[in-house]
Image (cartoon, rainbow, N blue to C red):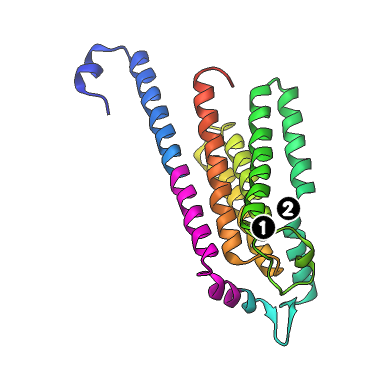
C-alpha cells in the first residue's frame, strides 16, 4: 500500500506502474526465499539419508506396497500395476524429451526464443544436476525389484526431480497465458498432480525409496521455481 502523499500527487498511470513494480519485486523476493527453503529441505533429507536415518521408515513404507510373501511383486490387481507403469512413464526421459522439444519448437515458431531457451535450459540443466547428484551420493536401489538393480543410483529420484522441473515449469508458462485465477490454479494443479503421481509410482514399483522421491520433488520444485523467478526478472528487462 502506497503512502497517501503519493496517491494524492501521482497520476493513476504512474501509481499503477509503481504498484506493478513493487509487486514484481515482492514476487522475486518470495521466489528466492522459496527456492532457498526447498534447497535447504533437500540438503536436510540428503544429510539424513547419508547417515542412514531414513532407512527404517523407507523400508517400512516400501513393504506396505509389496505382495505378502513375494517382495518382488507390487500389490494390487494386474490392471492397477499396468496403470502405475503407465503413470511412471510420464516422468521418463523419452516422454519428457518429446514434450519439452515440442514446447520449445512451438515457442520458436511463435518467435519467443527467450522462453524456448529458458524452458529447455531448465530441464536440461536439471537433468545434468540429477546425474551429478546420483553419482555423488551413489545410493543403491531398493532390493524389492530385480529391475531396479539394472538402473542408475537411487538418490535423488530422477523421475521425480525432472518431472517436477518439467511440469511445474510448463505449468508456470501456461499460467502466464491467462489472467483468470481459476485457469491459473488449474494449470498449476495439473502440474502438481502429474509430478506427485510420477513420484508415487516410483515407490509403488519399488525402484525408489520414499526419501529419494521427496528429495527429488524438493530440488525439482526449487529448480522450476528458480527458472520462473529468472523468467520474471528477464521479462521485466524485456529479454523475454
Residue 194 seen: no
| In this picture, residue 18 sits left or right of residue 195 | left
Residue 18 on the magenta span: no
Does dot 1 land on a helix, a strand or a loop? helix
Location of residue 134 with respect to 23 vertically, above or below: below
**Percent x, y for residue 17?**
39, 18
Magenta segment: 35-61
**Percent x, y for residue 199?**
64, 59
Given contact means CB atoms under 8 Å apart, are the residues at marks 1 and 2 in contact?
yes
| In this picture, residue 210 sits left or right of residue 34 | right
**Closer to the camera in the image, 154 or 114:** 154
**Percent x, y for residue 222?**
53, 45
In terms of secondary structure, what is the magenta stretch mainly? helix
**Residue appearing at x 73%, y 38% in the figure:** 100
The disc placed on residue 41 is none
Q: Quadrant of residue 174?
A: top right
Residue 116 seen: yes
Looking at this rendering, what residue extends furthest in the bottom direction? 69
Residue 48 on the magenta span: yes
Q: Quadrant of residue 127?
A: top right
The residue indicated by pointer 1 is 198
Does dot 2 land on a helix, a strand or a loop? helix
Q: CA distance from mark 1 to mark 2?
A: 7 Å
The residue indicated by pointer 2 is 90
**Residue appearing at x 72%, y 75% in the figure:** 144
Location of residue 73 with respect to 47 vertically, above or below: below
**Closer to the camera in the image, 49 or 35:** 49
- Crowding near the residue tagged with mark 2, few <14, some 14–19, many ≥20 C-alpha atoms within 10 Å: some
Amino acid at each position: 500500500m502506497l503512502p497517501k502523499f503519493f496517491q494524492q500527487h501521482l497520476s493513476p498511470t504512474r501509481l499503477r506502474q509503481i504498484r506493478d513494480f513493487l509487486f514484481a519485486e515482492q514476487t522475486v523476493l518470495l521466489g528466492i526465499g522459496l527456492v532457498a527453503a526447498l534447497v535447504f529441505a533437500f540438503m536436510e533429507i540428503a544429510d539424513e539419508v547419508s547417515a542412514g536415518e531414513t532407512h527404517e521408515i523407507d523400508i517400512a513404507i516400501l513393504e506396505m506396497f509389496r505382495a505378502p510373501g513375494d517382495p518382488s511383486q507390487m500389490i494390487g490387481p494386474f490392471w492397477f500395476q499396468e496403470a502405475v507403469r503407465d503413470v511412471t512413464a510420464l516422468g521418463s526421459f523419452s516422454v519428457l524429451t518429446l514434450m519439452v522439444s515440442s514446447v520449445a519448437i512451438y515457442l520458436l515458431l511463435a518467435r519467443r526464443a527467450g522462453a524456448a531457451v529458458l524452458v529447455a535450459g531448465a530441464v536440461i540443466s536439471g537433468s545434468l544436476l540429477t546425474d551429478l547428484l546420483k553419482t555423488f551420493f551413489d545410493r543403491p536401489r531398493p532390493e524389492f525389484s530385480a529391475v531396479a538393480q539394472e538402473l542408475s543410483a537411487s538418490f535423488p529420484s530422477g523421475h521425480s526431480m525432472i518431472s517436477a522441473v518439467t511440469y511445474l515449469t510448463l505449468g508456470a508458462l501456461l499460467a502466464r497465458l491467462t489472467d483468470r485465477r481459476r485457469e491459473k490454479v488449474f494449470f498449476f494443479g495439473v502440474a502438481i498432480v502429474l509430478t506427485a503421481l510420477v513420484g508415487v509410482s516410483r515407490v509403488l514399483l519399488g525402484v525408489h525409496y520414499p526419501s529419494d522421491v521427496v528429495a527429488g520433488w524438493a530440488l525439482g520444485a526449487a529448480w522450476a521455481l528458480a527458472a520462473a523467478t529468472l523468467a520474471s526478472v528477464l521479462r521485466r528487462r524485456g529479454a523475454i
